[in-house]
Image (cartoon, rainbow, N blue to C red):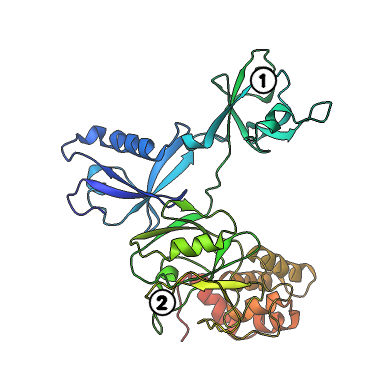
Amino acid sequence: MAQLGSCSIRVIDLDDGSVRTISWDPNVPDQVFESLVEAQLRAQFGVSDEAWVDLIDTANSSLVHITKDVLSNVKDSLCLCLAAKTEALAPMKTNEVFEVSFNERALGMTIREHNESVIVNHFKRQSNGALGAAEACGRIQSGDVIYKVQGARTVGRSYDNVVQMLQTQTRPLCIQFFRPFRRDGLFAVEFRGASLNMTITTDDVNVIVKDLPMAHPNIVGYAEAHGVRMFDIVHAVDGEIINGLEYNRAISLLSRSTRPMVVVFARSKMMPPTPGRSTGVMTSRFSFASTVAPSPRTSNMDGIGSRRGSGCSAMSGVDGESMLVEEMLEFCEGLGTDNVLNAKEVELLKELVLSMRPDVCSAVKRRNKNALVAIVRSPFMRIWDSLLKTRESILLA
């Protein structure tokens, strides 16, 4: 972490939560400072020439200008942000690229155009049923992007041009592929205290945040205070990626006493349940809310309290309880289509959903049209509508 006048900063890689230190000579000329820092970022994080490099201040989610004056006054860790230079799919990092050498005339794969790039579509087996060359190598997957053929880039070339490059009779034929890494929705939290103030569990695909216990009465915990939401996916911890349902491994990593600990989350599209209700779809959870890290073990969610209520409602687990925000908004629009509400009332209802008002969200999830009509047409809604339009944060005691 850099202090005033220091010559280094800590930078977090959102891909895996690893941290690297970028340093510089305080006497380096201002006109070459940006290029020097960018060169270090590219070298230490393995950033390819296909990506732009930026730094983000996680404290206020703002872009940090790479100048000596600005970076010398940075107090917290920054996050590395990568952006593609073109609309075409291209590797952001050098470690995303891998090369396969083909000796057979038939490559054993079909290709198609996607986002101004050419990707692997399907594998094609030999006439005798044996695996084709592409499938037999064991490294290529459907959806992989063809990046280079015999060292020549395919990015920006037409589909027909790439086909001609692949139809060459030269053998061995060296093709470089890369597998796009999904970075949308990733964000990092640097935990410094002993307590993480969060509970994890699993759904059918990932390790996710189950609950966000309070640190003290009326004081939100560290995780929630730094933007973590229920159902967010635990993506990586201190440089180690959590692949899918690696629940026990996630517990082991999060139980470590190392501080600061960097945890990378992926924002989930799942909408958190309304307060005081259980989703009824989670099978186990593990809490990191205590100040002393507990031993890794699984436990059943039944009988374990949470600040949002541990009692299971009679409606828990019914269809709609885990509706996405998009689905809730579509339901609201459907009320207008069915002439249950007028256009203005539909817009107000959608605003209430987006503001996460508990009674409205609960009624939408239950598809209770009568309750929604009563709420929207209540005299108090005129006041609420006015408050929403001011875009102010109102604390309702």
Residue 263 appears left or right of 143: left
User: Could you tell me which residue is drawn at 32 percent across and 45 percent down?
Assistant: 65
Q: Is residue 97 above or below residue 150?
A: below
Q: Position of residue 149 (x, y in %)?
A: 59, 21
Q: Splitting the image into 4 quarters, where does residue 203 fall?
A: bottom right
Q: Position of residue 344 (x, y in %)?
A: 66, 71
Q: Position of residue 235 (x, y in %)?
A: 51, 56
The residue lying toward the viewer, choosing from 221 and 324, is 221
Image mark for residue 284: none
Q: Secondary structure beneath disc 2?
A: loop
User: Could you tell me which residue is drawn at 47 percent across and 37 percent down?
Assistant: 93
Q: Splitting the image into 4 quarters, where does residue 279 fall?
A: bottom right
User: Could you tell me which residue is drawn at 40 percent across and 85 percent down?
Assistant: 217
Q: Quadrant of the N terminus?
A: bottom left
Q: Is residue 380 above or below residue 66?
A: below
Residue 147 appears left or right of 21: right
Residue type at mark 1? Leu
Q: Are marks 1 and 2 in contact (CB under 8 Å)?
A: no
Alpha carbon of mark 1 to alpha carbon of mark 2: how far?
Answer: 58 Å
Q: Is residue 86 above or below residue 367?
A: above
Q: Is residue 20 visible?
A: yes
Residue type at mark 2? Ser
- Circle 1: is it few (<14), some (14-19), or many (20+) Cα within 10 Å? some
What residue is disc 2 on? Answer: 290
Please tell me whether mark 1 or mark 2 is closer to you in this view: 2
The residue lying toward the viewer, choosing from 368 and 342, is 368
Q: Secondary structure beneath disc 1?
A: helix
Task: Tell me which label, 1 or 2, sits earlier in the chain.
Answer: 1
- Circle 2: is it few (<14), some (14-19), or many (20+) Cα within 10 Å? some
Image mark for residue 166: 1
Residue 300 appears left or right of 125: left
